[in-house]
Each structure stands twice: as structure tokens, then as C-alpha cells.
Amino acid sequence: MGRITVRRPVERLAVGGARNRRADTLAVEEPLEIRVAGTPLTITMRTPGDDFDLVAGFLSAEGIVRSAEDIAAMRYCADTHEQNNLDVVLAPGVRPPDESLVRAFATTSACGVCGKSSIEALRAEQRYDVASDPLELDAGVLAEMPESLRAAQRVFDRTGGLHAAGLFDGSGKLLALREDVGRHNAVDKVVGWALRDGRLPLTGTVLMVSGRASFELTQKAMSAGIPVLAAVSAPSSLAVELAEDAGMTLVGFLRGETMNIYSRGTRIRA
């Protein structure tokens, strides 16, 4: 846990009041270079921790791997002092990433879709039939998920600076939670955990995110077979369009006892 947060001095000032100095806890943000068979694939800014889940989820979303068996090994590179370079060895017979996927630049912690050659390529990569998922939810169960997510955010309580992604079953039980400075990283960590545990596709589950529902998060949920994506904030127009096309249920502004249902509302019982 040592590298997840750091302590830094801060000057606290109230308008018309006194100044005072104190120590503040910050969420760590560091680059992670992802390599496949020694060849750099991409760099993402992330909060250290659950890096193997992050990389597995990223490779799954990119269509490079489909199950834990596709990954022979993952290890931090021995040629670097810090654990900010992770190399993946694919199993025999698994095709390495296409050159068009290689992104030789650092993505920001808020955007992981940058560098894709086309939005249409993402839309076409629907691996599982989420439209036929039989999951039905009580609205009351869904309404309790933001509080459950918030209560489980241990690092957020200390820093106030992390996004969260939580995976719930249809009864509202929290199955997994991951935190990160990047929304897409938090989701990749959840999906990577599921992939490494042999749980894909994530039939009958809900992905709850602490921020907005972007196109990229919708795509990641879709690629993992998650039928319901819920967010405490707004979705984008493209996220709604993708959810409708895929047969996913997309919920936004999930706060208190109200919510906006943007697609496939028949899964949610009032």
C-alpha cells in the first residue's frame, strides 16, 4: 500500500482566515509501460496496485486475450528499478498485437481510447451477446449500489482523488472493487480480476462506476459480457448509442432513489 498514497505538505487557507501548513495524503500517479514479449505496447498513467489485473483487463478489452489461458506469464521487467514496466508472455498460439494497436505514446489517466484507428473498430468488437442476458434488477437494489461502492473505497477516504469501479451481482452483492486515478484503469482492473479468475463472460452482473459513463467504459463493459452499466454521473451520447446497439442497460445519474435509464430499461423493475 506504500506506493498507492504519499504524504505531501500543503498550505491550508480559508478566505478571511488564517493560513496553516499540514500534511496531506495524495493518490500516487505513475506511468506503467505494458510490453508484450518484450515489445512496448502502450504506456498508461495509473495508481500502482493490482497491475496484473490492470494489464489483463486492458489486453482483454483490446481483444488480444480472451481468457486466463491466453496469458502464459506476467512479470515486472528486471531491467528497471521501479515496478513501472510489466511484460506479458502470451501462450503458444495466441497472436501478438497487431501493429496498428501499438500506441507509442502515453495516454492520460482520463482517456484510454486515444490512439484507436476508428470508433467503428471498437463498436465491432462485441465478443458476448449481452442483449440476451436474462438479468433483471429491482430498482431499490440498484439504488443502493453507489453507497456500497463508496463505503468500500478505502483509498478515496484518505485522498479524495480516486475513481472506483465495482462489480455487483443481481442481488446487490459487491464482488470486486478497484480504485485508480483513471476511470478506465479502474474498470480494466475489475475486468482483469475476472479474467484471471476465469469468470468471463460476466453474465448477470452490474458494473458501477463512480464518475460518468463514457463510450470507452461502455465498450469495456460490453467486451466483458456485462449487461448493466450504472454511473453516478452522466453518460455521453456515444455511450448511449453503443449500449443501445449492444443490448446493454445503461443507467446514469444514479443518486439516492432516482436514476435515468438510457437503454434497455426492461431489465429494471420499479
Image (cartoon, helix red, strand yellow):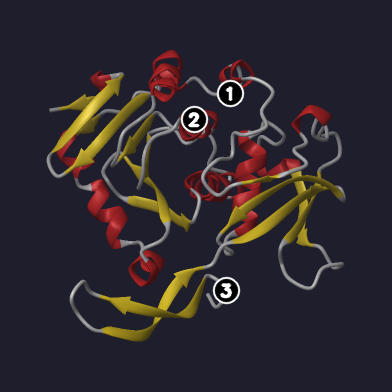
Q: x%, y% of residue 95?
A: 83, 32
* Snapshot quadrant of residue 152: bottom left
Which residue is drawn at the image coordinates 46% and 56% (left, top)?
A: 178
Taking depth in this image into account, of 5 and 175 the one nearest to the observer is: 5
Q: x%, y% of residue 175?
A: 39, 51
Residue type indicated by callout 3? Arg
Q: Is residue 159 above or below residue 137?
A: below
Determine the CA span between mark 2 and mark 1. Answer: 7 Å
The number of callouts visible is 3
Residue type indicated by callout 1? Arg
Q: x%, y% of residue 76?
A: 76, 63
Q: Is residue 200 left or right of residue 97?
A: left
Q: Are marks 2 and 1 in contact (CB under 8 Å)?
A: yes
Which residue in the structure is indicated by mark 1? 127
Determine the CA span between mark 3 and mark 2. Answer: 32 Å
Which residue is drawn at the image coordinates 85% and 34% (left, top)?
A: 93
Q: Is residue 84 left or right of residue 202?
A: right
Taking depth in this image into account, of 21 and 114 the one nearest to the observer is: 21
Circle number at residue 225: 2
Taking depth in this image into account, of 251 and 66 the one nearest to the observer is: 251
User: The residue tagged with tag 2: helix, strand or loop?
Assistant: loop
- Answer with mark 3 or mark 1, whichever residue precedes in sequence: 3
Determine the CA span between mark 3 and mark 1. Answer: 35 Å
Closer to us: mark 3 or mark 1?
3
The residue lying furthest to the front in this view is: 16
Which residue in the structure is indicated by mark 3? 3
Q: x%, y% of residue 22?
A: 37, 85
Q: Is residue 62 above or below residue 180?
A: above
Q: Is residue 207 above or below residue 149?
A: above
User: The residue tagged with tag 3: helix, strand or loop?
Assistant: loop
